[in-house]
Image (cartoon, rainbow, N blue to C red):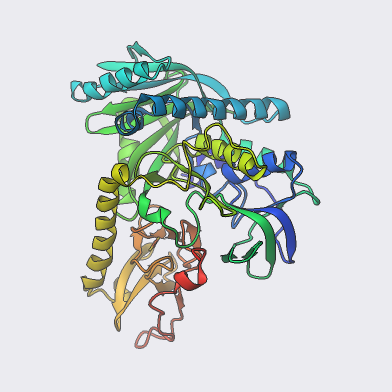
Amino acid sequence: MSTESLWQSYADTTSFPELHHDIEVDVAVIGGGITGITNAQLLKEQGLKVAVLESHRVGVSNTAHSTGNLYEVMGTELIELGKKHGTDVLRDVALSRRDAVSFIEENIRKHQIDCDFMRVPWHYYTTTEEHSEKIEKHLAYSREAGLPIRETQLEHPALRSVRAVMMDNQAQFNPLRYVQALARIIHDENQCLIYENTNVLDVDHSGKSVVLRTEDANITARFVIHATHTPKGVMAYHTLMSPYREYGIAAKIKDPQHPPGIHFGFHGEDHYSTRVYARNGETYLVVVGLPHKVGHDDTHHKMMLLENFAAEKFEIIEFTHRWGGQHYRPADELPYIGRKGLSENVFVATGFSTHGLVYGTLAAQIISEDIMGREHKYARLYSAARFTPVKSAKKFLQENVTVFTAMIGDYLRRNKDSLVAVAPGEGKIIEHEGHKLAVYKDETEGLKVCSAVCTHFGCIVRWNNDERSWDCPCHGSRFDTDGEVLEGPALHALAKADLVDDDMPLRNPIPIIKDNLQTGLGR
Ligand code: FES
């Protein structure tokens, strides 16, 4: 069973250089996923000099863990958008997303990218009466917004619907193959520099130019784009968005068991997205679903539920892949795209919910136009400088109650475990002399001990028992078992502790919190 996503199994690895010397560019892009690479493409085409700074490998952080689905309508979110903003906004959101999908399709055609892009129908359905009202509302809002949606009936035994709607001409692809190919096409040594394993540790935009710092290089730029799914450092956006994890599994099935297209449906209390991916003579069923707030649920249990669902509904030959993906849900359901402040040269692209492939592409279109001094027709709709207190208020309060509960609850909890009580392959939070420690024991019983205090803003991380990571419940930063940042707004690794012996396991006192307000990107 692979813990990589299915898309990674059918993509190559990239090998762009690391950055070890100072450079000067027009635009620095933090993050080499679909948002960052598409931005770099569009800016290069306009004649600007761009550097992309990716902390891992191109596309592997979020793009490789997405659904690979591209569509303009949004299931339950469409209803929320209609309720909060009305059908004019809903129509504009759908049209802007349609444009972004067309852009991807045209890019693939123009550059002959082999990434399994296919136009397919999209379905939204329920197998029980209980959720019929949602389908009804979806239909009503879509019709009022003028979207070409229609009623249908799903007859496949695994997906048999009580009520269903569908829209033709949506799409699916392998997102990692697309982004890697695009990166190789645009990379050159003069105008579009792509660096991997290059971690931005600080951004100073207090001067006329922006200065980004890595371990051993400074990057000076006129503009900086945060294309990391959620902006790095401390920004107000983190209080307006909730971080969620969602899971995907892939299994070999007997073809053609699953009907063509993307199927998003309610099965009892839960909803699942299913589709088929075929390459190199193999056919896979892909099932995605069961989102939960980061650090707030048992991830292994979620994976098991996904597999149980697949096994119950389809004739599985073999489960092959399990992966988790992260997304950030904005309080008012609209992503934040554009300048952080109206007069600033710092751009953000965040709050994409589960639609990062489409919104990431759209963000690149909007931001590149702004940098070139033009206003994209959808720029105001997604303005990152907006704040909608009334629409956001309820969710804002709910989310911050969760954050404070996590902080206070963790500090009050007294964990009696000791280091020896940690089983191989397991992680535990342990209290030692007033410090919260994130303790992981590997299969050979080697202990890795870090501070459990998230370096973003001081919440206590929690163990993710399927993906073997330390996940922060507050704003979604995730760290590997060595404490290194995997994703999220944290800039710095968890503080590490050295083990001496059983009686005195810690040599170094653990810093309680790194003051990101002083050293981070928020200044
Ligand atoms: Fe914000 Fe951890 S991600 S405190």
Say above or below: 395 vs 314: below
Q: In the figure, is residue 149 to the left or right of 28?
A: left
> What residue occupies the far front of the structure in this picture?
343
Query: Can you give x and y, in whole percent of width and height, for residue 437 in the image?
Result: 35, 74
Q: In the figure, is residue 392 to the left or right of 122?
A: left
Which residue is drawn at the image coordinates 56% and 26% (left, top)? 99
Query: Can you give x and y, in whole percent of width and height, for residue 367 in the image?
Result: 59, 42
Query: Can you give x and y, in whole percent of width and height, for residue 97 in the image?
Result: 50, 29
Work out whether residue 437 or residue 230 is closer to the camera in this orientation and state it. Answer: 230
Work out whether residue 265 or residue 221 is closer to the camera in this orientation and state it. Answer: 221
Which residue is drawn at the image coordinates 69% and 62% (left, top)? 220
Say above or below: 479 vs 244: below
Say above or below: 385 vs 99: below
Which residue is drawn at the image coordinates 49% and 63% (left, top)? 522
Say above or below: 49 vs 201: above
Query: Can you give x and y, in whole percent of width and height, for residue 400 in the image?
Result: 28, 56
Please count the marks in the image: 0
Q: Residue 431 falls in which quadrant of the image?
A: bottom left
> What residue occupies the far right of the structure in this picture?
190
Quick check: can you spot residue 282?
no
Quick check: can you spot residue 45?
yes
Ligand 1 shown in quarter: bottom left
